[in-house]
């Protein structure tokens, strides 16, 4: 058995079809799309196809903007700081509502805005690790400029009631942003069904390349650019277009949509099999109910076993897992998401996340169950707390 | 004769060696470098090699930061807005000095900061299309937070006296930033020789991939991040690392350094041959003296011939040129750099830029001279102003 990659919420393998699609843009079709000559213009149809794939994948409509960014971190910063410069600095609003379990790029942007005088409400999650739409409703005041709630949590995989939250915001006349990084390719993301105003995504989370992401901006809305500069994206996001990245992300989006059925049937079956297998270990706890989660994720705590020790043990056996967000993996702090769920400090050090993809095989899951079970036993035998 | 690409100041072909170096990072070594397992850690040595190549290419020292960004536009925005949040909003300084010929990403960031109350001085260029260090010296006041002057101009190719300007700023105790996008691979960029505090670059301008750039930050200096988020780059620039892009840009930097001799001998010889050939056309004007310019660029004006008409004619014959910055090529405005040089409105519509690279051949230059000369004659024969 070769290495097994079960950390698809951190990043994903580039689909070989995506790699192939990017191939011509390095040494052949290398023009700058903003150039007027054929080296520039010949890539316009390719970019149009890619953009159409993104629009279709989100069910965005003509008049909506999809801005290409370098990653969801940039998309999220664009929204939060755009609202700051546009609505907050200029007007009477000074309040943002978000959650305690957002990705660091939303959380730290909010902290930065607090240092600039913005008030931020961080909503907790309930026992199912979910944010409730009612909590959002109650947090909104007439000073609220923006609500930002992720579509699905990166660590637990829990899906938030985004449609309901978006409708609450719409009814209250407050702008709503969702970080959908962990939703694309896992659940249907339909922007005609869900009235979100802004939505962020990152190509490398759904088998596209690293270094490219997007920001959906609902028709009629405007944000000051985070990156001022040239005329790219009608001046809404400057910087030479990353042609290969856009083409790759576009195809990755189409493949994600095409595979949504497979993801929700086969990947879910494998995740459930993995989860059922691991639940046979004594004294383990899985965070939240599986029907509330994206189909690829299980976050499990093994009492008495440090998440990091388990991660190392699994790694030695060739299994890649995570104790939480890769973006905070160098931190020795207790997992902030688990802390936010309110499960206490013991659990906050014992969680481990396994996240599958459509490239995960049954054989890999069988091996993972066996290996995880053995590792948990081994580590418990030397545990001082079990 | 196949198509001829003479628009290397807009973007460049990816060096086939760079493409090859990026190859493993799509479908094999695809881990997130911030992950703790081997998929993440196995790319650390590759990233270290790439970073070392960037440090060597700039002669940066231990303790200096080189932050990876998505492009120079992001790098430039990071500096200008970082200074705004750090020095200007918090302190007593409120003034930035720059030039009238900066790239739109510096110019438009400055305009944005003006809308936030920052005072900006835009220095003009002299008859050689150069900014003078003395002009910088005189523009600095005790309110000046930052001076930002490009190393070489994208349109004319003129090299600015960056060492002198950096020394003026150092002597005055004012921070100095340079957009070196058009200098890398064309002139020696040695940060031990030139005491710049911040320096921006973009991979795709020196045969690296699009979508990745860098920002040098001198040891001891700090900037608030433009992208808040995870712990990447010690929290100074968040976002999942674009591993393929970093590896590619690192190698591209090494190749650029290795080829600096070739660039200054052979590319310069071809540029001079092209320039000499075109100067045989009657009533043409080349902007600035060639010894003041980077070795690959000539900006030429053909009296009575619209730059855009000439560009289209050349394009039909398979030659890719430019009327100026690709980032502003959709604009019908007179070329702002030419306007800034003060050459009047007729000239500002007639300029055309030809920019070579180490991939340009003698055969291509011979064909370009012949084709350009014929095109100029053809267009003059139907010109109403000649």
Image: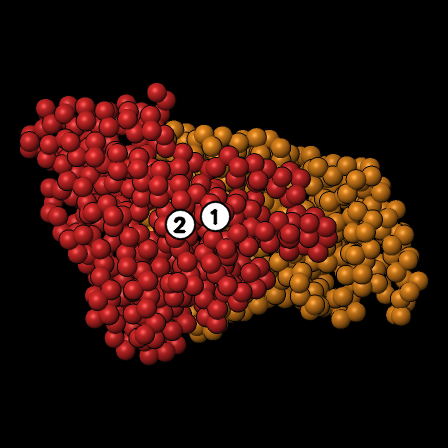
Chain colours: A red, B orange
- Whether residue A206 is visible to the viewer of this picture, yes or no, is no
Image point 67% across, 60% down: which residue?
Answer: B329
**Is there a contact, CB below 8 Å, between mark 2 and mark 1?**
yes
Tag 1, which chain?
A: A
Tag 2, which chain?
A: A
- Residue identifier under label 1: A253
**Residue sitting at the far right:** B381
- Residue identifier under label 2: A184
Image point 45% across, 29% down: which residue?
Answer: B28
In front here: A15 or B283?
A15
- Whether residue B366 is visible to the viewer of this picture, yes or no, is yes
Q: Earlier in the sequence, mark 2 or mark 1?
A: 2
Residue B277, position in %: x, y? 86, 47
Compared with A185, B43 (above or below) is above
The image quadrant that residue A170 belongs to is bottom left
Residue A70, position in %: x, y? 47, 50
A92 with respect to B24 (left or right): left
The image quadrant that residue B342 belongs to is bottom right
Name the quadrant of the N terminus of chain B. top right
**Residue sitting at the far top:** A1
Image point 59% across, 51% down: which residue?
Answer: A49
């Amino acid at each position: 058995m070769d290495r097994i990659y079960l950390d698809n919420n951190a990043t994903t393998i580039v689909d070989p079809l995506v790699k192939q699609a990017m191939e011509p843009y390095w040494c052949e079709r290398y023009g700058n799309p903003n150039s007027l000559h054929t080296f520039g213009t010949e890539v316009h149809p390719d970019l149009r196809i890619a953009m159409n794939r993104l629009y279709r994948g989100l069910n965005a409509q003509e008049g909506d903007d999809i801005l290409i960014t370098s990653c969801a971190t940039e998309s999220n910063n664009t929204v939060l700081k755009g609202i700051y410069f546009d609505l907050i600095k200029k007007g009477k609003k000074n309040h943002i509502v978000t959650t305690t379990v957002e990705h660091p790029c939303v959380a730290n942007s909010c902290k930065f805005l607090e240092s600039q005088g913005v008030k931020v409400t961080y909503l907790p999650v309930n026992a199912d690790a979910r944010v409730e739409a009612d909590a959002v409703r109650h947090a909104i005041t007439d000073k609220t400029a923006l609500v930002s709630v992720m579509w699905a949590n990166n660590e637990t995989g829990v899906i938030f009631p985004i449609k309901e939250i978006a409708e609450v915001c719409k009814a209250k006349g407050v702008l709503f942003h969702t970080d959908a990084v962990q939703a694309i390719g896992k659940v249907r993301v339909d922007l005609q069904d869900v009235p979100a105003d802004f939505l962020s995504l990152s190509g490398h989370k759904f088998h596209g390349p690293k270094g490219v992401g997007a920001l959906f901006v609902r028709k009629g809305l405007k944000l000051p650019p985070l990156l001022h500069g040239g005329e790219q994206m009608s001046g809404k996001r400057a910087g030479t277009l990353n042609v290969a990245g856009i083409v790759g992300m576009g195809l990755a989006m189409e493949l994600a949509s095409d595979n949504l059925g497979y993801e929700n049937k086969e990947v879910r079956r494998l995740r459930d099999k993995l989860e059922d297998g691991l639940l046979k270990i004594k004294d383990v706890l899985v965070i939240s109910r599986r029907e509330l989660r994206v189909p690829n994720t299980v976050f499990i705590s093994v009492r008495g076993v440090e998440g990091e020790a388990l991660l190392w043990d699994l790694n030695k056996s060739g299994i890649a897992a995570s104790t939480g967000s890769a973006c905070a993996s160098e931190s020795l702090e207790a997992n902030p998401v688990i802390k936010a769920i309110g499960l206490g400090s013991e659990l906050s050090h014992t969680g481990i996340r396994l996240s599958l993809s459509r490239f995960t095989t049954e054989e890999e899951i069988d091996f993972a169950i066996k290996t995880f079970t053995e590792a948990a036993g081994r580590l418990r035998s030397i545990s001082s707390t079990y």
